Image (cartoon, rainbow, N blue to C red):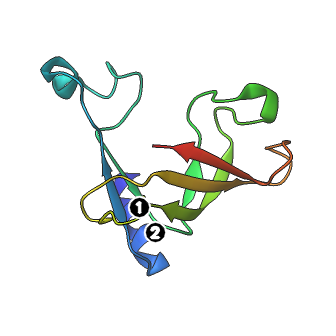
């Protein structure tokens, strides 16, 4: 799956952002994905990339395990270098009928 995702990101012909986990302890840094409740140590993102939510985030709004969407925009704090920092906001448009809020965009804060 990981290799297929890398190929699909490359096919987008957009800048790919490598979001590495920020660990708050040595123990957390050593933890496996399973021990970290499914959180990966690195996530690759690009505008136009398809994503799937893998846990219930906001069930009343349809942001549930298995919901899918597309990364629409990556925002950074003014003056920051995207090569050195995580995005401040990742804006994801969810498939029609999945997110039932007032706006079509749901922003995941990093």
Query: Which secondary structure lies at badge 1?
Result: helix
Percent of width and height locating residue 17: 36, 62
In percent of the image, x 44 and y 81: which residue is there? Answer: 13
Label 1 environment density (alpha carbons within 10 Å; few <14, some 14–19, many ≥20): few
Percent of width and height locating residue 2: 36, 53
Circle 2 or circle 1, nearest the eye: 2
52 with respect to 44 (left or right): right
Q: Are marks 2 and 1 in contact (CB under 8 Å)?
A: yes
Numbered circle sitting on residue 4: 1
Residue at which label 2 appears: 8
**Number of callouts:** 2
Q: Residue furthest front?
A: 79
Q: Residue furthest bottom?
A: 13
Identify whether 25 is placed above or below 110: above
102 with respect to 54 (left or right): right
CA–CA distance between discs 2 and 1? 6 Å
Percent of width and height locating residue 84: 24, 59
Q: Residue furthest left?
A: 26
In percent of the image, x 39 and y 69: which residue is there? Answer: 7
In-front residue for pair 21/77: 77
Quarter containing the C terminus:
top left
Query: Which secondary structure lies at badge 2?
Result: helix
Identify whether 8 is placed above or below 13: above
Identify whether 9 is placed above or below 92: below
Percent of width and height locating residue 12: 48, 77
Label 2 environment density (alpha carbons within 10 Å; few <14, some 14–19, many ≥20): few
In percent of the image, x 56 and y 65: which residue is there? Answer: 73
Identify whether 11 is placed above or below 32: below
In percent of the image, x 55 and y 35: which residue is there? Answer: 54
């Amino acid at each position: 799956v990981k290799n297929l995702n890398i190929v699909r990101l490359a096919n987008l012909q957009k800048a790919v952002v490598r979001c590495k986990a920020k660990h708050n302890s040595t123990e957390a840094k050593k933890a496996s994905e399973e021990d970290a409740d499914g959180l990966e140590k690195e996530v690759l993102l690009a505008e136009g990339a398809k994503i799937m939510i893998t846990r219930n985030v906001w069930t009343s709004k349809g942001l549930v395990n298995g919901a899918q969407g597309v990364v629409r925009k990556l925002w950074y704090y003014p003056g920051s270098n995207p090569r050195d920092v995580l995005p401040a906001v990742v804006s994801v448009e969810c498939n029609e009928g999945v997110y039932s809020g007032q706006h079509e965009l749901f922003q995941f804060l990093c």
